[in-house]
Image: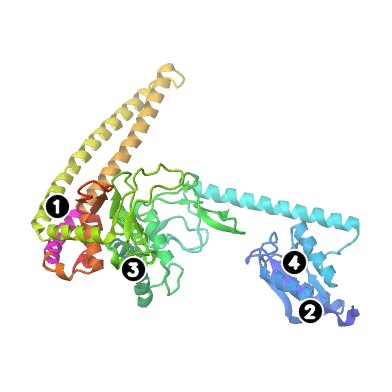
Amino acid sequence: MNDSQSKRAAIYCRVSTSGQEQEGTSLQTQEEACRKYAAEHGYTVDEPQVYREVFTGSELWDRPQLSLLREAARRRAVDMIVAYAIDRLSRDPVHLGVVLSEADHAGVGVDFVSEVLDDSPEGQLIRFVRGYAAKVEHTKIQERTRRGKVARAQGGRPLPGPRPRYGYCWDDPRPHQKNRLLVDEQTAPIVRRLFSDVAAGVPVRRIVDCLSAEGVPSPGGKQLWRRATIIEIVRDPIYSTGKTGSFRHKWAPFDNGQDGRHVVVRPAEEWVTLPDVPMLVDATLQEAAIARLAYNKETAARRCLQPENYLLRAGFVFCATCGRPMRLNTRRDCDNRYLCPGGEPGEEKCPHRPSISTKRLDNSVWQDVMAYLLHPELIEAELAKKMHDDATIEGDLAAVERVLAAVAREERNLVTNLAQLDADSTGAMAIRELLAAKGKQHKSLQGERENVLRRRAAWEVAQARLADLQVWCRQVAANLANADYEHKRMALLALGVRVTVWPAGREPRYDIDASIRLDAFSVRNLST
């Protein structure tokens, strides 16, 4: 070891948070004290050997600056490590022991400005006890912090993160004053555009490219959008329900045994419910967008080497015996077939597992669909019937609201009667039980009313699309000869085509059903 006049020293400074400015703990005061100590002891400190970081002292392996310092010590790039206090190096006694042992093995000394490092058994015990006490205090701080967050959320105030949900803004951007989410007039139109485009069948990657090319900032403030960001927005229930909560996510280990943790969504019952926020889109639109994402995933071309050769793949063909979707089964002898999968492990097996030639079925089904499309008056008749049937929604809504009003009157009467009785009387107890039952009935009826309202919204969307769909049917009938693979698939989707295949020996081998799906219709994507 060199003498004290030539020892090279490294300084390590750490605070847990950027706002820590207490005497002896801020980065600046720590560094000043460490430099003064090094000068008094004749150590030389080069600027590259000053390591500063803001990180919790309960971690060891994740601290980047401490990792660089340990690497320098292992290379003997320094002779001494100077820190202000033991807890600045680590609050965990085990971690502290690792660092000290590692430095000792490399022949590097460790000094602390505010306390003496005693290597005797008594000194080691004292360090361990002090480190353990610091670790316990850190755990208590975490628990107090969590209790404070839970209390804030239970009081109806959201936990403010670095930024609000995309499409919303805080009512007051000042720290500790963010109590409510409001509609952001700049980003809310982007959210509505995303839902409309996805529901209309615009590929997500095309949406990503368009937003990036237009210079629309992403939720993270960057110019480039990511596909996962759009999918996350579309699936977020807050936009169509207005309902949100705190503690929606948590850290969990990977399911595949991989080291480390990742963020997962907690079960909804573990959320702390917050007051509703303004809705940005209709529930029907979000359902259509989510369904479209599922359809895109199922029918993605990457799942098939030559998708254009198989018109009915991924979702149009079903087994008549077990009802499962049939899968494409490609073979070397070119006898490609749609095949019933038979059932996953643990499921009841299909007794027949029928299969049929892809070429035979695709051609035959498309001929039948063309015959249907060449008579658009048939489609228009089906649409008119569908509109008439859905018009019964108003009657359903009126019926539910009548029952709701009656239950509300009964609840008011019960409350009036309860106020006239002694709280501990038998009659009061019976009325409270009736009130509880009526409360459950009221809640259930409100759920039914919401379901009917969703049906009415879907019916209104369908009516708005009816005229366009009728025009489209006539356009398609006039251009069937030029229909390519993509337009054929969109026609099958819009008509709600479902092909059921029976086992060999039955004639006909398949049945075709078509129930026009207005929720899947888009003029932009279906026009030929």
Of tags 2 and 1, the one toward the viewer is 1
From where the camera sits, is residue 451 visible? yes
Q: Which residue is mark 4?
A: 24
Where is residue 32? Give x, y as percent.
76, 75
What residue range appears in magenta? Answer: 462-476
Mark 4 and mark 3 lie on one chain; the one further toward the N terminus is 4
- Of the two numbered discs 3 and 1 in the rendering, the one whose residue sits closer to the viewer: 3
- Magenta stretch secondary structure, dominant: helix
Q: Which residue is mark 3?
A: 306
- Distance from Cα at disc 2 to Cα at disc 1: 81 Å
Q: Which residue is mark 1?
A: 383
| Residue type marked 4 | Gly
Q: Which amino acid is tagged 1?
A: Leu
Report the number of discs: 4
Q: Position of residue 132 (x, y in %)?
A: 77, 53
Residue 199 locus on image (x, y percent): 29, 60
508 or 29, which lies in front? 508
